[in-house]
């Protein structure tokens, strides 16, 4: 890795943990796809930018030649064992702290502590509020008691390694919703509807717009009291996402209303709305953003997102994330892509005499970790 | 043309036929404009990227110096005659098969067979479902019988050179519509409304949202039974398009619902939503896309669209098209732009040590023709 | 500045005037922010692309070394005095005429005549119709008389240096509105609602959708009669903007309806919808656009916007603007960014043998000033 960066904090402010058992070929390939389905007949999930990037950059970390085939890669991964594989990628990523969303398929992944231990660096938790709401219903709750039970459950989840809240409202009701806080009666009616749905379907999955608005507003209120940031899923995702309705500017009314509360709000991944995210970061003092996930997924094209992210927004408002999920490769690759692209853009600025080397270092220090340290209050 | 590509299938999976009679100056200039109006006073349709590109790249094919003026170009085109001009551009394009949308102004253009014959390559037809619906009304049909008559007419149109269906729902009701199938009563009421409109206006033009939803769902059902793909107009177009409502992610609900049917769905041109199209191609196994048309229209800037198209989507999901209409120049230019940009991006990847030469060849083979051959079932 | 451009008209077709008194540090820093709030604790408004660009490019104009600190910059600015500072930046910008929107915080800024006098070049006025409407209410008007009073006030504002009208409908009701003209009863009811709001809040700020539609249609009618263009705020702005709803293609229905009137309509700044703006400029003979403002704000990344602006649209439809507001630096910087990027893109086209040097000069002449001269009818 780049020596110039060796002493800089690299805070992965949005990631998930890894799978610690060995992954069969189809399981691994599922994890390099955002689809819920296998690749179409005659095609393979390897044949996309992220598959090519793993063959190029991750294979050598497992002692394979660069561009080893997918089959060779899976075989070598099994030969080494998941423990060794994860340790190599996590340690070589150079990440100095993890801020982990623990709400997505926790049974599949290790805990945030195990992730930190495997890399020998501090790790922190972010509480996914939709998971808390679903847990409240799983534990049993009536419609009248739901609002209080949810609030109590969020507060109860805030142990001393929790450094933020998160909402996936984008996935559940989209961001194109009424921007105001619902009242108690509306929440009770919506909770009642959800209870009926649970009874009918046997599945507990929050999705109602009123309940999501309750999460947004209650979350902001708790975050304000506790001094925590809130993370927002924005833009691209799996087939549950309707992308046009996940443009972060759909939340402008909400951002405007809660601005005086001073709660840092971080817009995650953002692609293809990273320009819109940069504008919001310029317009509102409490808005932050990253271009995580897509730099992993974009393979050789990873630089464009960083160029676009650096167009307008204050350098003090951009963050670093890998959005790695399951595969330790994505921590390694995502960090490499982030660093290389930030180096490349700023080196180009220096070459054009548009920036000094010292100020470029300052920008890297901010975006790589210092901005996250400041807003999440990380202390080791 | 590039020798490396000489043996590769180049399947133009979305194009229209050409005009076979000589074109007067104003007719030619109309065809390098997406506007319905003449250029404003003091300006000319030549003074845009596609006009500049024709002067640079097409003039020499007609034995003119590069950058000949528009006037010289038109004069030489008339001198050679449309037959000779078309043969030169079509044969020199290197396209190995045409998949032709025959539903747009068929009286102006030659048939798909004539197009294939002029270039001495196979040609296939795609049935534009809106044209079938309008033909059904033209032939005479009552509201109650419309749904069955439409289905029967689509099925009747499927001769053995038809390899796909197409919808221009984007133009008629936009993509921002109810995503479910309408029921028989709704269709009958909508057909009745359309009949009234026809009587009042004397014009037969489908546009009702319910009738468009019927096309989407009936089309998918017929396509499933017959093993055909469906093409969707996406993004930019003529002044009838309301661009923001032609983002393909407006169709997410529909794509999600029909995914199990396994019908390949191809998103055409897509600009400025090619990033969104790439995401859909990643999320849904049956979604494919191209950046045709815009590479013709973008003149010297044609590379950016290819760079953006290659950011995320599987290499097995992108297709090649020119979207040429009327002018044989656009087959030549569109193919040149497509090839040069794909070569340039992949050469750059090889230079960065992000891709091997062999795998780059594989990617080109897929996108240039093999993906289209696979989903359209082309056999010669 | 570039000698090749020295004799070319540089018409800044959209700008505001400057502050002529000395600016304290916090006042200056507010003006390099689109936020309504101070920078978050531990950060500074200087630490963003436009701040870096001012330190790099404007500091030397004030005899400071390049990359002088923000503190040094402010101190030197005060030392020289606003008059000297403004004269240096305005004269060295090379702008040959100003078209000034005088409707935004006129008390803070000098007049359009003073701006022209400071630079010793002609200056013209654009009438912001929302300001006229608010002035009508401030002067006193009943609901029934509002429509006529507004029309009369717009007409009365058209002295002989007025060369266009402007609407900020994007800011007030967004562009996602009913595209038709309201009738007299609707306008009267809306005006009545506005009067009630004024009485209740003590604030006069137009925002109602019906009243904005009245502005759009009445404005177009007056513009047609007087031969004036209309300017439209598009895309990015301050926190009052909801960006997704300021995509200019939301106005497609209106543009389509008024196209026969032949009124030139200019889409301002447009980012991040400059591709959409380019499409509209291709589709409608009366639509024009610029990528002003964002080239100032984008710092070292200013070239991308020009590359994207030049993708599709006719060269006779793009315009130059700085959208400078308050700070004379933004005239200097915006003009430099515009020129450098246009030079860079066209030099690259020449290098690729995609354009001749002569035609590149023609394109520069059109976009830098001749297009604006033609549609605004500028005569000195």
Image (cartoon, coloured by chain):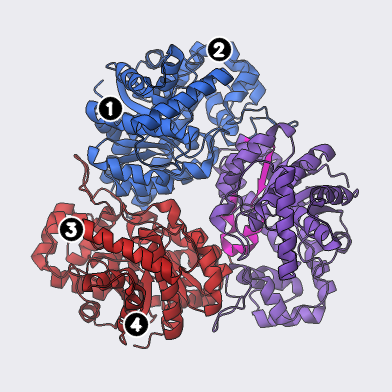
Chain colours: A blue, B purple, C red
Which label belongs to residue B208?
none
Q: Chain of mark 2?
A: A
Of the numbered discs 4 and 3, the one sitting upstream in the chain is: 3
Q: Between tags 3 and 1, which lies in front?
A: 1
- Residue A327, position in %: x, y? 51, 22
Q: Between tags 4 and 2, which lies in front?
A: 4
Q: Quadrant of the C terminus of chain A?
A: top left
Do tag 2 and tag 1 residues touch (Cβ < 8 Å)?
no
- Secondary structure, mark 2, is helix
Q: Do the dots labelled 4 and 1 sit on one chain?
A: no
Q: Badge 4 is on which residue?
A: C155
- Secondary structure, mark 1, is helix
| Separation of residues labelled 2 and 1 (CA atoms) | 45 Å
- Secondary structure, mark 3, is helix
Q: Badge 1 is on which residue?
A: A222
Q: Which residues are magenta?
A: B284-306
The single residue placed furthest to the right in the displayed view is B160
Relative horizontal placement of residue B163, taking residue A130 as reference (left or right): right
Q: Badge 2 is on which residue?
A: A80
Q: Do the dots labelled 3 and 1 sit on one chain?
A: no
Q: Quadrant of the N terminus of chain A?
A: top left
Q: Badge 3 is on which residue?
A: C28
């Amino acid at each position: 890795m780049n020596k110039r960066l060796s002493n800089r904090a690299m805070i992965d402010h949005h990631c998930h943990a890894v799978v610690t058992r060995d992954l069969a070929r189809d399981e691994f390939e599922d994890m390099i796809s955002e689809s819920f389905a296998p690749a179409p007949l005659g095609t393979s999930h390897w044949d996309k930018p992220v598959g090519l990037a793993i063959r190029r950059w991750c294979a050598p970390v497992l002692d394979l030649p660069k561009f080893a085939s997918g089959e060779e890669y899976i075989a070598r991964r099994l030969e080494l064992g998941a423990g060794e594989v994860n340790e190599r990628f996590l340690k070589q990523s150079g990440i100095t702290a993890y801020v982990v969303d623990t709400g997505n398929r926790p049974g599949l992944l290790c805990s945030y502590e195990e992730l930190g231990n495997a890399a020998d660096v501090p790790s922190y938790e972010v509480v996914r509020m939709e998971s808390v709401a679903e847990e409240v219903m799983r534990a049993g709750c009536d419609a009248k008691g739901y609002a209080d039970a949810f609030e109590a459950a969020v507060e109860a989840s805030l142990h001393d390694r929790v450094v933020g809240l998160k909402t996936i409202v984008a996935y559940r009701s989209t961001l194109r919703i009424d921007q105001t806080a619902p009242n108690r009666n509306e929440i009770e009616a919506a909770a009642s509807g959800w209870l009926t749905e649970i009874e009918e379907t046997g599945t507990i999955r929050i999705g109602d717009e009123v309940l999501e608005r309750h999460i947004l507003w209650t979350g902001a209120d708790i975050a304000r009291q506790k001094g925590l940031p809130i993370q927002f899923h924005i833009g691209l995702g799996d087939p549950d996402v309707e992308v046009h309705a996940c443009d972060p500017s759909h939340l402008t009314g909400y951002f405007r209303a809660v601005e005086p509360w001073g709660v840092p709000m971080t817009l995650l991944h953002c692609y293809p709305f990273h320009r819109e995210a940069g504008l919001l970061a310029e317009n509102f003092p409490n808005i932050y953003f990253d271009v995580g996930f897509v730099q992993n997924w974009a393979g050789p094209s990873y630089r464009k997102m960083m160029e676009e992210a650096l167009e307008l927004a204050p350098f003090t408002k951009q963050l670093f994330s890998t959005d790695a999920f399951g595969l330790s490769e994505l921590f390694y690759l995502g960090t490499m892509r982030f660093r290389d692209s930030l180096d490349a853009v700023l080196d180009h600025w220096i070459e054009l005499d548009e920036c000094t080397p010292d100020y470029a270092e300052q920008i890297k220090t901010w975006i790589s970790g210092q901005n996250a340290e400041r807003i999440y209050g990380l202390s080791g």
